[in-house]
Amino acid sequence: MRNDMRWMTAAAMAFAMWTARAEAPATGTPRLQFEATLLDFGKVTQVESVSGTFRFKNAGDGVLRIAPPKPSCGCTIASLKPDTLRPGESGELAFTLNLGRSRANLEKHISVTSNDAKSPEVSLTIRADYTPLYDVGPAALSPDLAFGVDETEQTTTITRTDGKPLRIVRLDTSKPWITAKQEAVPAGDASSARIRVTVRREGPPRRLNENVQIHSADQTNGPIATVYLYGRVMGQVSVVPEALYWSVVDGGGAAAPGRPESAALRRVTVRSADGKPIEIKNAESSIKGLHVELVPKDQGRSYELVARLDENPAQTVSGNLSFETSVAGQPRMEVPVIVNVFKP
């Protein structure tokens, strides 16, 4: 019985000592050490993504804890294992970088934070000089149709960078008033083709955000490339600038007295594109404290909208200035407005 008591007492003491050690605060200094902080893939082509691994270890004498990695853009996916390392243990940070479809010199970053007191944040760099299998230049066109112009044409060139024949089977446009036609390049290179894009005037004046998709016999799961169209169909009434912006500090209440006119006023010129007189009326603002005055110029061929910010909003707001015109195709027009409020 007495021996049993001694054994139980010794066991209890050993358990207590183990518990004390387990609950004691961690000691030592962790240190995050990467084998390399830069991975340069050099020239890359004929792939949609690149993947790699950054290797690291705990070179300190304390437990290292690493937070989830944070890539600099959504085109990069990163994960690490493990996130907790004892002294001397190693781990890996794996990543995949989606390259997109346009030629580019890419440099992306991954931020890694840890409990390493000397270097709490490490930036990893990924580089690639990317040339897609199908290279389009330019990849974006800007077709602007001035008032009185019914259509406009622009061209781009697509090249298969591995030198093999370019077998285009179809060109799809996002709208029926856009047409696209394939033309051979002057040199007769079978790996390249010119794409002629025609945009016709249809519908009211507006901004364009459309595209042309290029399909090949060598790829059946989608287009091999996309040409983007960013332009405008302009009407008889033009507005310059097309948007207004204010930046104020500590909004809420009347504007500070004595501030310069440039801080309070914004001006918009409304003009007749063909030089004929037009009527502009009923100018108004949708934002409280922002007043607008309509001033005729040049015998009715142009007007000036004078917008005055007399009252700062409590927080950032957006709205518009609007007015009516005598032009049938543009009976009412709006100018977007943003008042950005910064809190010190």
Image: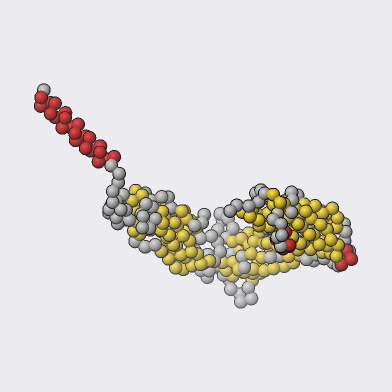
Residue at 27% over, 40% down: 22
Q: Is residue 203 left or right of residue 276?
A: left
Determine the residue positioned at 69% across, 55% down.
256
Residue furthest out toward the bottom: 187
Which residue corresponds to the image point at 78% horizontal and 66% vertical from the top-left? 146
Q: Is residue 26 above or below residue 338?
A: above
* Residue sitting nearer the eye, 64 or 179: 64
Image coordinates of residue 333 in percent, x first then y, are 79, 55
- Foreground pick, 50 / 83: 83
Place of residue 80 in the rendered image (x, y in percent of width and height, measured from the top left): 39, 51
Question: Relative to residue 150, is residue 17 depicted above or below?
Answer: above
Residue 11: quarter of image: top left
Quadrant in which the N terminus is drawn: top left
Tell me the quarter of the picture where residue 261 sits.
bottom right
Report the front residue among 238 and 51: 238
Q: Position of residue 127 (x, y in %)?
A: 46, 65
Instruction: Give left or right: position of 65 versus 14.
Output: right
Q: Is residue 178 visible?
A: no
**Is residue 19 found left or right of 100 in the rendered image?**
left
Name the one closer to the observer, 181 or 96: 96
- State the scheme by which the image is colored: secondary structure
Q: How many marks?
A: 0
List the single residue furthest toward the top: 1
Is residue 74 shown to the viewer in this render? yes
Instruction: Return the x and y of residue 342 as percentages of the image width and height.
Output: 61, 54
Q: Residue at x 15, y 32 (%)?
A: 10
